Amino acid sequence: MTHFGYRLAAGVTHRLPGIGGKLAHSLAGRRQAADRWIEWARTHRTNDPAVWVHAASVGEALTAMPIVQRLRTAVPSLQTMLSYSSPSMSVWPGSLETEYADYIPLEDRAGVGAALDAVRPSLIAFARGDLWSEFAAQAVARKIPLAVLGATVRPRSRRLRWPARQLLEHAYRSVSWIGAVSDDDATRCVRLGTPAKRVHVTGDPRHDQILERVVNSISLHGLAEWADGYMTLVAGSTDWMDARVVIDAFAAVRRTSDRVKLLLVPHEPSSHNVSGAIRFATERGVAAEPWADGQLPSTSACRVVTTVGALADLYACGDIAYVGGGFCRGVHAVAEPAAFALPVIVGPRHDGSPDAVHMVERGGAVALPHRREAAAVLSRVVLHWISDRAACRTAGLTARRTMAGGASDRSVPALLDLLEGR
């Protein structure tokens, strides 16, 4: 399928009736984005070199963060811009320190071209691999080099199958440089169409971001008091199925030991999700309350977090981590709790995360079976680590050893070459 076919599919998708949820919010944010980019460039774009970073959502933005910081150190006059497609980025408090951030324009040839003509980026860098074919095509037509930072392609990714592979082939073939997380990711990038000589294994820049970040300990003071003296399970990025499994397991653990607490952090902490988790916990005999940044400690056994963007810090209050997503689309970032040397528990669908796979293989993480037996297995694992603190610490340290820094330093020289036209 040609790039013309992609343009046709994109144009139809943008106009489909009945679209709701996050996709509707994303499309609404993107519809006038080209005009906003043009307006920003009219008053703020200088003649200095500029990097336009595209990160689909928060996780991808965090991948790009350490690389952008190093580029700004190397080129102090550098202007940096950030585009995104997920509504979560529009409200996330920890966004990149950039001159401008907004939704990426819709895949419309005229709108994308006008935005690129106004912004005049010296380099476009996609985080993880969220390439937009029209955006890439218009950049190539203007001789703007394209790069991918911390590229990862899951083994069962839809990008590898028809029709996505054919629709995106032009974009991947146009990329000047890819920094892949692993050898397997590099191989899959080549399958997607990027010439092998342009694909390099750098490791994961997200590890640099996690290892280098400073914990906001002041905001955690009250929560740390609540967790003090208890074995605390931090369940992060949970969806509704994760929450049910974790709460069921926690209720079983509490029947054996009352020296354990649960901090539940929904992936989307809407009032509906928070109240639903509290209600479910109450039905299971677990006292639960909401928690927001700065609240005082309570006596409840379970707190459900309502704050957005705090999860990476919240793992500092835990002894054991559960990372959600493994019963649905795939497990979320296990590197965040591993950085604090917490042993990690994940759902059955973890094979799309190299970090999770490595931790499970080396004993730093435990993968649960499918849902029918998951709560029972989770409760047994937590009880084992409560009774054997040495085993818990050993597993946590093993998880920590899977973290490897240096990907950002390996990526920056190639990006500087692209910026300088070499």
Image: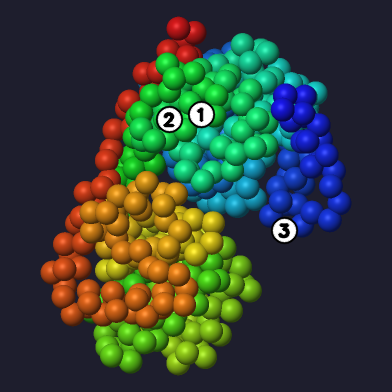
- Residue at 48%, 39% in the rendered image: 153
Direction from residue 107 to residue 121 in the image, left or right: left
Q: Position of residue 222 (x, y in %)?
A: 36, 72
Q: Quadrant of residue 76?
A: top left
Q: Mark 2 sits on what residue?
A: 187
Q: Mark 1 sits on what residue?
A: 191
- How dense is the environment of label 2, judged by Cα within 10 Å: few (below 14), some, or many (20 and up)? some
Judge depth for marks 1 and 3 and give the one in front: 1
- Residue at 77%, 57% in the rendered image: 20
Kindly state the secondary structure of the residue where label 1 is placed. helix
- C-alpha span from label 2 to label 3: 34 Å
Q: 207 or 177, which is in the foreground?
A: 177
- C-alpha span from label 1 to label 2: 6 Å
- How dense is the environment of label 1, judged by Cα within 10 Å: few (below 14), some, or many (20 and up)? some
Q: Mark 3 sits on what residue?
A: 21
Q: Amino acid at mark 3?
A: Gly
- Residue at 81%, 31% in the rendered image: 8
Asked if residue 166 is positioned above or below residue 198 in the image, the reply reads below
